[in-house]
Amino acid sequence: MCYTLTMDRWIALLAGLLALIVGVLLFWLRGPTPPVAETAPRVFVVEIRDHYFDPPGLSLRPGDRVIWVLKENAQGDGHTVTAYHPSQDRPLRIPPGAPPWNSGLMTQIGQSYSYLFALPGVYDYLCVLHEQQGMVGRVRVGSAASSSATEQGLPAAAQSSIPTVDELSGVVGEAFTAMALLQGIEYLVQQSQTAQALRQLRDFQGVFPQSALAAALGSVREQFENRLSVLEALLNRGAPMSAVTQTVSQAKALLESVAKL
Ligand SMILES: [Cu+2]
């Protein structure tokens, strides 16, 4: 009797231990609870040309990503994408606390550099080689007001080429941002990220009809919307890159009328 009880206890103890080991193992194998899935950031492409950024300004939401792609380097000396920041030997012209960036010298056509704009505010950046020729850009993130950044302290050529915060808050900023969004869609398709390209396109199609940009496009609005629909159809059926590029160029050309500074 006594022996049987001990035996039962042993079995119970072993079973308990086994359950504990299996539990710990399972927990260990599963790892920590995965974070809530985040949607991928929107991707905007700014083209680096001789000697300007295209488009020169953007109006973004916090968490958006900008990819600068080198498109021209005729003189072979390259370009950089560099934040105005004391660490780059320049005055601070990005929000305090925002990490500065510097692409270093970019010389290969197609080479790219990316930065995620997490904090709201106004960010000014330059090409260290051609700042004096006005090769500067500005990114407005969130609802930064016009008083938050001025052109004071920039070289004369840069002062005339950089969009003001007021311009970026208005329809010019919307046109610039739409251009960069279309270039971003083209870039995503190139990278075989067609699903994200489609999400980004549909997101834009959803807000466009109520935008000041739609009103400002006037007589070419319908043509522009038509290009967006063609682009969506192309992405849906995995059309060749050349067709995507052509449609993006046509849509961008229609934005030119609004984007003139
Ligand atoms: Cu440059």
Image (tube, helix red, strand yellow):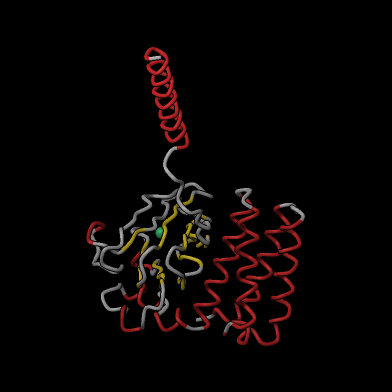
Residue 25 as seen in the image, left or right of residue 153: right
Is 72 situated above or below 205?
above
Q: Quadrant of residue 16?
A: top left
Residue 156 placement (x, y as % from top left):
32, 76
Is the N terminus in the top left, top right, bottom left or bottom right quadrant?
A: top left
Q: Pick whichever, 199 or 245, lies toward us.
A: 199
The one nearer the camera, 161 or 185, is 185
Which residue is located at x 59 percent, y 55 percent?
A: 187
Residue 209: horizontal and vertical position, in percent? 64, 81
On screen, residue 108 above or below 31: below
- Count the labels in the image: 0
Residue 47 vertical placement versus 167 (above, below)? above
Query: Residue at horizontal 67%, vertical 70%?
Result: 251
Quick check: 59 left or right of 175? left
Percent across and percent down for residue 114 are: 44, 54
In this view, the residue farthest toward the front is 1
Residue 44 lies, in percent from the top left, at 52, 62
Look at the picture and state if 83 lies above or below 24: below
Q: Quadrant of ligand 1?
A: bottom left
Name the residue rendered at 74%, 57% in the picture: 236
66 or 247: nearer the viewer = 66
